Image (spheres, rainbow, N blue to C red):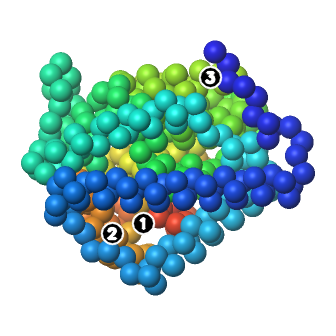
Amino acid sequence: MQALPNPFDLPVAEPIAKLAYETMQRGKNAFGAVHRQVLGNLKSTLYPGLGKVDSLDDETLAYLQHRQADLMEKDWQDAQLGVYPISLLFDNPWEEFFRLYPQVWLDAPHTWARADQKNYQDFSPGIDVDSYPQYYIQNFHHQTDGYLSETSAEIYDLQVELLFGGTADAMRRRILAPLKKGLATFSAIPASRIRILDVPSGAGRTLKQLRGTFSEAALSGVDLSRTYLQKTNRLLSQDRGSLPQLLQANAESLPYVDNYFHGVSSVFLFHELPAPARQNVMNECFRVLQPGGTFVICDSIQLDDSPELKTAIDGFPAMMHEPYYRHYSTDNIVERLQNAGFVDIETDVHFMSKYFTARKPA
């Protein structure tokens, strides 16, 4: 079934579009805040003391609000500059929200019980865990079946949106401008021959943003989870356009020849990897990139660039069960990229995410 056309694909006066965008984002942020408060109160009632972390003071909360407002403004500006179409700002799966939001609530008690029991490797019978690396067999975020069930694949992106107050897609879109700038190196190549890889493809939101921006490019995505790949395929099948090539694979050993892609993106991956795997994935991304190609990473903030948010950074791994996050928060990602062979490395920070842009020498 084809999705209905996005009304913002049509000519709309700029002030009206911006007002609509700001109103939508404020609404999503308010809803996310209420959701987290109500869910947190219920959790505290049922499991007193579970996941207790230090609260953020008023000054830090105001600082976060300022960073979030900056993110929204940059998101709007890039759309205005033509980095990506304005319609991407309004690409919200509302039908899925109304269908899946009750499932988020139904799953919450299971995550609380699992966290209370410190049961971090709990998987349903019938789920094969033997073919995955040991570090992947985790109930990341305490979520049921980790990344290996259909339910997990269905509700994951909604859970992320609620966690970040409706800003997850805006943070993902921060990779598009540096990637587009890097791909200008290959301007002599027809757009249809440009190849971009997304590692991992997750539930498909980043690939959807990439297709909206690079509509003629040949897109590919890899992920360890079969169910997440199936979710990505369903998501992208709703829109017109060629489907990306999706492969189930470990990013530590990408199933592509050397020097194949012009661009590689990676969103919210490296904080969920132990240090050796982190380096291995970067080495592989370097290998499959063409000389002159661009690698863009979006991941969590780190202590060196966001010391004001130390309380949040320190509390996140305990609250969300992120077993490799503490090491990631102080890891020297720039040095790892250099060790892989990348040059011209630049970093940036937007709201709760940090970005690395790197180039493979020509």
Mark linked to residue 313: 2
In the displayed structure image, the side of residue 52 where residue 355 appears, left or right: right
Which numbered disc, 2 or 1, marks the residue closer to the eye?
A: 2
Which numbered disc, 1 or 3, marks the residue closer to the eye?
A: 3
Question: SS at mark 3?
Answer: loop
Mark linked to residue 301: 1
Q: What amino acid does circle 1 point to?
A: Ile
Q: What amino acid does circle 2 point to?
A: Ile
**Mark 1 crowd level (few <14, some 14–19, many ≥20, 10 Å Cα):** many
Mark linked to residue 58: none
**Mark 3 crowd level (few <14, some 14–19, many ≥20, 10 Å Cα):** few
Q: Quadrant of residue 331?
A: bottom left
> Looking at the image, which is closer to me, 361 or 247?
247
**Residue beneath the point at 30% across and 27% down:** 149
Report the Cα–Cα distance between label 3 and label 2: 37 Å
Quadrant that contains the N terminus? top right
In the displayed structure image, the side of residue 293 where residue 122 appears, left or right: left
* Residue 268 % position (x, y): 42, 50
Mark linked to residue 238: 3
Question: SS at mark 1?
Answer: loop
Asked if residue 340 shows in the view, the reply is no
